[in-house]
Amino acid sequence: KINIVDTPGHADFGGEVERILRMVNGVLLIVDAFEGPMPQTRFVLRKAMELNLIPIVVINKIDRPNARPAEVLNEIYDLFIELGANDEQIDFPVIYTSARSGVSGFSVEELEDDLKPLFSTILEHIPAPLVEYNAPLQILVTNLNYDDYVGKIVVGLINRGKIEEGEIVSLIKRDKRKVLFKVIKLYLFEGLKKKEVNKAKSGEIVAIAGISDANIGETIACKEKPEALSKIKIDEPTLTMDFIVNNSPFAGKEGKFITSRHLRERLFKE
């Protein structure tokens, strides 16, 4: 099974980029065959290299008018060197694709009518996760979702151990407190959908319902021997928001959820 996780490419979403990169074992660096590396390419690549992730370069849109794949590849090499890539990172495989047409290949001149060259390269170059099935459970809370039926959903990679639906687990808070929760629902990801399962093991990315007090960067562990994982260090946010009272003359006259209580509930869901 291969999990492909999309990540935003802009520095404004630096925290989300760093969290997602901690769940994967390698990266596909997708670059436009005409535009070449963009400013956001530099940001995401730097984060991936800091975590020593294995890169595969995908030069996409080779069917664009004025596409310049050879020049773009040289620009990518320059970017890797500028960011201080090591020998393993700079020796990356290159795949040429047109995602819209569904073709790919190891050179522009020899394209296949499917994406098998890309998939075979992923299998060959991206290492499988290190798994410890019989070790005590450890999951770093990497993302949070919300469901109207089961409430807050915690997403993370199982670093080690196993987890089952109905199991009592320990949530290690940022202040080292340990709180017990019951796993109400357990999901694995298949494409863009979640599939409910009874159990999951080390190496899998899971979504867990029932841990209502979890926050990003905290650790889910077994209740018998809870051990915290290292915290996620993320860049300071570049975007701030102020939530203020609506002083418009139309305040309270339209809309369904308009009270401070409704606003508070929605913010805490997020």
Image (cartoon, rainbow, N blue to C red):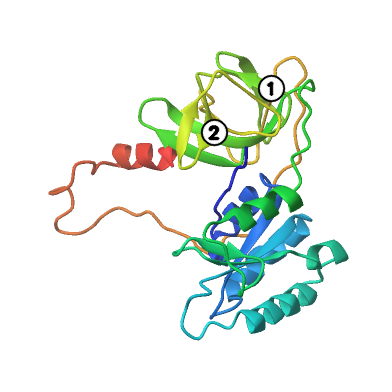
Q: Residue at x 79, y 28 (%)?
A: 132
Three-letter code, disc 1: Lys
Q: Nearer the viewer, residue 24 or 128?
A: 128
Q: Measure the C-alpha gap from mark 2 to mark 1.
A: 16 Å
Task: Give the class, few, some or many, for how many residues have Cα within 10 Å of label 1's Cα (few <14, many ≥20).
Answer: many
Per the image, the residue denoted by label 1 is 162
Per the image, the residue denoted by label 2 is 154
Q: Does the CB distance between marks 2 and 1 fall below 8 Å? A: no
| Residue 235 shows in the view | no
Horizontal and vertical percent position of residue 267: 40, 43
Q: Residue at x 80, y 68 (%)?
A: 90
Q: Nearer the viewer, residue 17 or 6?
A: 6
Mark 1: which secondary structure?
A: strand
Three-letter code, disc 2: Val
Along the polypeptide, which appears first: circle 2 or circle 1? 2
Horizontal and vertical percent position of residue 105: 62, 65
Horizontal and vertical percent position of residue 242: 41, 57
Q: Residue at x 58, y 67 (%)?
A: 111
Task: Give the class, few, some or many, for how many residues have Cα within 10 Å of label 2's Cα (few <14, many ≥20).
Answer: many
Total marks placed = 2
Quadrant, the N terminus:
top right
Instruction: Determine whether 263 is above or below 113 in the image.
Output: above
199 vs 147, left or right, is right
Q: Which residue is drawn at 61% across and 49% down?
A: 20
